[in-house]
Image: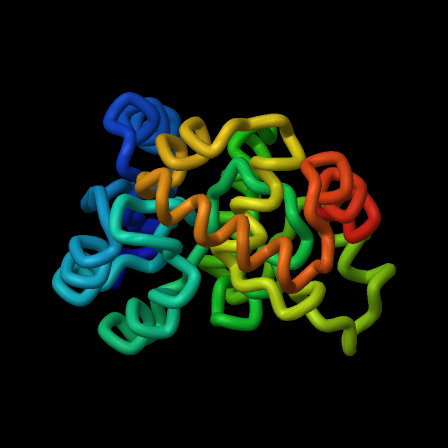
Amino acid sequence: MSMGGTITLLLAEDHRVVRAGLRLLLDRQEGIEVIGEAGDIAETERRAAELRPRVVVLDIDLPDGSSIPAIPRIQQGAPGTRIVILTMHTAPALARDALRAGATGFVLKDAPEEELLAAIRAAASGRTYLNPELGAQLAAEGPDAGGRPDDLSARELEVLELIALGHTNGEIASRLFLSVRTVESHRAHIQQKTRRSTRAELVAYAREHGIV
């Protein structure tokens, strides 16, 4: 899994420029070695099983879907491998879902680089690292809080967050690698589950539940 004290890493990120930047940052760090890269969930599972990295830095949005359901599969194929989620999404419910699925770190893409490095080192030593602001929100909710309001799925939470941030259906489809029709379907389910029909009502709902 690693040689000596070196933390071996697999980078799972579909945007090549972002992945190259991450690799450049991580390769400069003493005691950290990037041993592989992947651009989608299927490749991540395959490469993790092959390379047995100590830590996988995993984007939450990959072309073949949300990576959260894949976390147990990755760890089954590579026992002992730790998962650090890297995402632009700030919904506390997504962090809760990721941790429940088996992730040991949750870092936002706009966080300082030191935060990602701290999460990687914590994960490698068996400790959990959570973005401080999200950690405070989860602690305030309490351990028994249901991670997803009104039984919204992880994907529906992602769509709702982007709606609340002002994105159109087309923009959401592009960001999440979905068809516009699929986004419209998710939006209809969200409206049905939350009993909110207009964009203004959805924005208010998202703010009330800490999704944005």
Asked which colour scheme the image uses, the reply is rainbow
- Give how far across and how far down residue 2 sits, in percent: 27, 58
Rendered-image quadrant of the N terminus = bottom left
Q: What residue lies at 76% left-to-right and 59% top-to-bottom? A: 138
Q: Can the viewer see residue 212 in this picture?
A: no
- Give how far across and how far down residue 24 sits, in percent: 31, 24
Q: What residue lies at 71% left-to-right and 44% top-to-bottom? A: 202
- Residue 119 vertical placement versus 192 (above, below): above
Rendered-image quadrant of the C terminus = top right
In the rendered view, does 201 fall on the left or right side of 60?
right
Quarter-of-image position of residue 38: top left
In the rendered view, does 66 fall on the left or right side of 207?
left
Total number of numbered discs in the rendering: 0
- Give how far across and how far down residue 7 sits, in percent: 35, 51
Q: What residue lies at 26% left-to-right and 71% top-to-bottom? A: 78
In the image shown, does 153 or 28 lie closer to the viewer? 153
In the image shown, does 66 or 113 lie closer to the viewer? 66
Q: Can the viewer see residue 145 in this picture?
A: yes
Q: What residue lies at 49% left-to-right and 41% top-to-bottom? A: 87
- Residue 126 vertical placement versus 173 (above, below): below
Taking the view exactly as shown, the residue that stands out farthest to the right is 140
Quarter-of-image position of residue 170: top left
In the image shown, does 100 or 126 lie closer to the viewer? 100
- Residue 130 vertical placement versus 179 (above, below): below
Quarter-of-image position of residue 108: top right
